Amino acid sequence: MLTRVHYAALRAWLQGLPLDVIAGRWLATDPDEVPGPRAALAMLHTIRDDLVQRARLHAREDLAEASATPGRSGTSMDRAIKAVRYLESMGTPQPLPAHDVGLWLAAPLVRRLSAAGIVTLADLNALCNQRGSSWWRHVLRIGPLAAGRIVQILVQHSASIGQLGPHVTCTALATPAVAGALQARRPCQLASWGCHTRTPQAVGPFAVSSTPSCASGRRALEFRP
């Protein structure tokens, strides 16, 4: 992950500061172990490559080109430094369906997916939804462990890439909540007839149940208008 220190080191390199100065001020993690010029240059190349990838994740090929090939002229250097500053101010990119799988997955996985015709994240998402949880069987040399990690990435960024079906993630669909809470029936309360509620009792298979007084009809016979 690129930090502000990395951006500062890259800008200093583009501005022509000596490698030993850059290594001692920005690249050394221990004052007693300062990278040599060769190691410092390799670190700066890695930072530049990460920055180019970040520009492409933002779909800014112009910034990627300016950062990758700054050139030797003053105009090219200024353009590269401005590109680095602009990329530093941009937020964390989100994966998009049109992004190449190589921008988000490791190189070995990318080679195997590319051999199967999977170029973009949209292609990968479509393959998963078409084939279900066993989609990885259609890609040579990708096993269930690597497939599970890929699915985790797709699920994590489903808001920007697209949803995976439950037949891919092996999770049940969420059951919608019942709109209204069920209310238990209230026993009849006929105060004028003297009907009282009774606590329900379990009735065995051969037991005789007694009829509640409110349902026996006795009060109805005694009633006179």
Image (cartoon, rainbow, N blue to C red):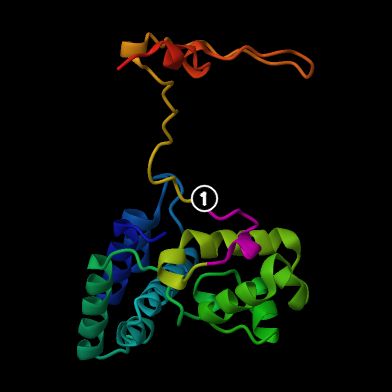
Indicate the quadrant where residue 166 lies: bottom right
Question: Please, what is the dominant secondary structure of the magenta stretch?
Answer: loop
**Looking at the picture, does residue 178 appear above or below residue 27?**
above
**Looking at the picture, does residue 212 appear above or below residue 176?**
above
Range of the magenta residues? 164-174
Image x and y of residue 31, in percent: 39, 45
Is 167 included in the stretch rendered in magenta?
A: yes
Q: How many marks?
A: 1
Indicate the quadrant where residue 75 lies: bottom left
Residue at left 59%, top 76%? 124
Q: Which kind of residue does numbered mark 1 sit on?
A: Thr
Indicate the quadrant where residue 4 lies: bottom left
Image x and y of residue 193, in percent: 36, 12
Which quadrant of the rendered structure holds the N terminus? bottom left
Image x and y of residue 16, in percent: 28, 75
Residue identifier under label 1: 175
**In the picture provided, is 184 more to the left or to the right than 86?**
right
Residue at left 44%, top 28%? 185
Q: Nearer the viewer, residue 201 or 78?
A: 201
Residue at left 69%, top 65%? 133
The residue lying furthest to the front in this view is 224
Q: Nearer the viewer, residue 101 or 162?
A: 162
Which quadrant of the rendered structure holds the C terminus? top left
Determine if residue 17 is in view: no
**Looking at the picture, does residue 185 appear above or below residue 113?**
above
